[in-house]
Amino acid sequence: MTETLSIERTEDRRETAGRRPVRQRKRATRPAWEEPPTAAGQTAKGLTLGVVVAVVLVPLWIIVVTSLSTQAAVNRAGGLVLWPTDVTFEAYRVMLGDSTVRNALLVSLGITAVGTAVSMVVSILCAYGLSRSGSVAHRFILVLLILTMFVSGGLIPTFLVVTELGGYGQWWALILPSAVSVFNILVLRAFYSDTSADLIEAARIDGAGDWRILWSIVLPTSRAVTAVVALFYGVGYWNSFFNVMLYMPTDSEKWPLQYVLLTYVNRGNGLPGSVNSGFGSQFAQTAPLSLQMAVVVLTIVPLLLVYPFMQKHFRVGVLTGAVKG
Amino acid sequence: MSSVTAEPPARRNKLSLRARLRRDRSLLLMTVPAVVLLLVFNYVPLFGLLTAFQDYNPLVGVWNSEWVGFDQFTTLFGDSLFWGSLTNTLYLSFVQLILFFPIPIALALLLNSVLSERLRNLIQSIAYLPHFFSWVLAITIFQQMFGGAGLLNQFLRGNDVSTWDIMTNPDTFVLLVTSQAIWKEAGWSIIVFLAALAAINTDLYESSAVDGAGRWRRLWHITLPGMAGVIMLMLVLRLGNALTVGFEQFLIQREAVGHEAADVLDTFAFYYGIATNNYSYGAAAGLFKSVISLLLIWGANKLAHAFGEDGLYRK
């Protein structure tokens, strides 16, 4: 089974490479044998795709516009604002001036940075360690990894192991249990296995060891997939809130942004520990809508900052892994 | 003499284990961190499943807790809350299969027919975006659009129509969570189908068009058979995951709609296991889910093989 996985991955890769001519077909001209589209068909297609785009973008637009609105504009609209009239950054100023939100932002950034770094180092090393076929025990380790995709102890046994190791209330409990994604390792490994054997052989003859080969040859030639896997890990850490709920539910100083979003914006609660911060008490039920929407925007912004740069790599990185993932 | 020439390749295969370990020691060393993490957080918890057969007491640990055999399971099977969450899970899974599954396929077909590569990439980028949002964020956005104080009700109030709170209605909760799942993941799910479409040989289209097949005939006889393998694989994965309908999504909304509608197997294990310190009970529910899930994956895969498709692995 493991062999099938790896072989199919490589085949997919080659297909992607060999698919270039197919992609060129899409140079905005229709092949001669294809019927011209009907007007009704074109309209239906345009409408459907328009709706797809709108359901994603319209709510985001409304949220951003509301976060930039004055209280007066919010009152006039009776809630969410659809079109910017008088733009103000007041909500952002208040929000970033509040210690709870600032704290949560730092926590989120910290968990994401440290977590992604740990995950990437562990995954890259493991993927390379398993990528040289014929090395001792690599099949055994691969099976060990893949089995975890099908069999798991589940929520409670994992919780018990982490707490018995003293993870309750500890930062590492938010990172280490989810640090390794076997799927991501398999994606990386598929690419590393594809690195030219000649190149590696040449480096080996020049006296390079495995560490050197990984650092100077394999990593530079697989930047795209590295970026995509890093994005996956990063998004996972940035979005995680359940681990916080499990391991530090009462320690509001250690809450990340997602948890603040849930407590403040979604549930409209005040935080138990932060009554003095002004923001928490202000927020209980009556927080200005623009302020709530500013918190929402804050959780999206980091993603939107990296998204455009990652976008072009998705096809390379994801398809290879996803087709038989 | 001839034996000498034959020896080198034979000898390479017979490197002693010690020599091979020596040769590959850095490779092995590299896998150590990942293996250790998986052992601790994935394999050790498997032993934690033993707590399902105990009356686990956190003060004395797994090894010293009292063994109670299948008592937890007996209680579990007599618990109407458990049956409620199991029915919810299966029902939600079924509705999601019917309503969700065809959408990415249709969208992929539609997108594939867009001629301009630029436009297609743009639409794809936008459709992928919600996949990267957290459930907290996705539900907050839904809350802002459809909640009691949301955009829809703001509009209804403005036009003197009675308001309608979709987010807290247990009766329509199934449709709500399904549309959330579609909004968040349908765009991302098209990736595999687009890949399958791109792999279809375009010569087939051309020759069949020359033979007089119209666009619907080509869709039916070339495109769909070309996607069949991937569609079947996705169906197998979906069936195998029938008992997992999304955990955080329900956890977050449970408060608003009540546990009767929102409890699924995973939230059951959380609320009646961890939140009440009744660990053994929750572990029993989790074990039940894992065992049935494994059977489902196995069965779905068998089914795929029966239809002559690859399923999760080649036979």
Image: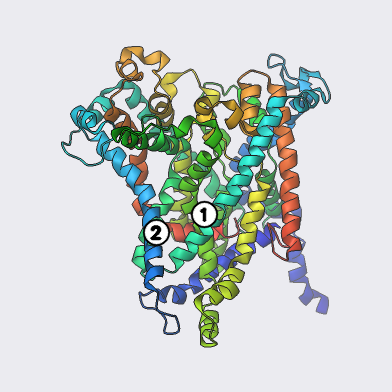
Residue A283 in the image: state x and y as whole percent.
Answer: 33, 20
What amino acid is labelled 1 in the image?
A: Ser
In the rendered image, the vertical position of residue B197 relative to residue B49, given as above or below: below
Depth check: give the residue in front, B237 or B86.
B86
In the rendered image, the vertical position of residue A27 relative to residue B155, given as above or below: below
Say which mark, if any, is on residue A202.
Answer: none
Disc 1, SS = helix
Residue A179 in the image: state x and y as whole percent.
Answer: 54, 39
Q: Residue at x 53, y 41 (%)?
A: B175
Depth check: give the residue in front, A67 or B23.
A67
**Looking at the image, how many numbered discs can be counted on the residues?**
2
**What is the spatial separation of the Cα atoms under label 1 and label 2, in whole angstroms?**
16 Å
Labels 1 and 2 in the same subunit:
no
Depth check: give the residue in front, B209 or A164.
B209
Left or right of A210? Residue A152 is: right
Left or right of B22? Residue A68 is: left
* Residue at the limit of the structure toward the top, as seen here: A276
Q: Quadrant of residue B211?
A: bottom right
Say which mark, if any, is on residue B189.
Answer: 1
What amino acid is labelled 2 in the image?
A: Leu
Q: Residue at x 35, y 74 (%)?
A: A28
Residue B76 in the image: state x and y as whole percent.
Answer: 75, 26
Q: Which residue is mark 2?
A: A49
Q: Give the number of the mark in front: 1 or 2.
A: 2
Q: Residues within 10 Å of mark 1 (few under 14, many from 20)?
A: many
The subunit letter for the residue under badge 1 reads B
Left or right of B266? Residue B219 is: left
Residue B2 in the image: state x and y as whole percent.
Answer: 81, 79
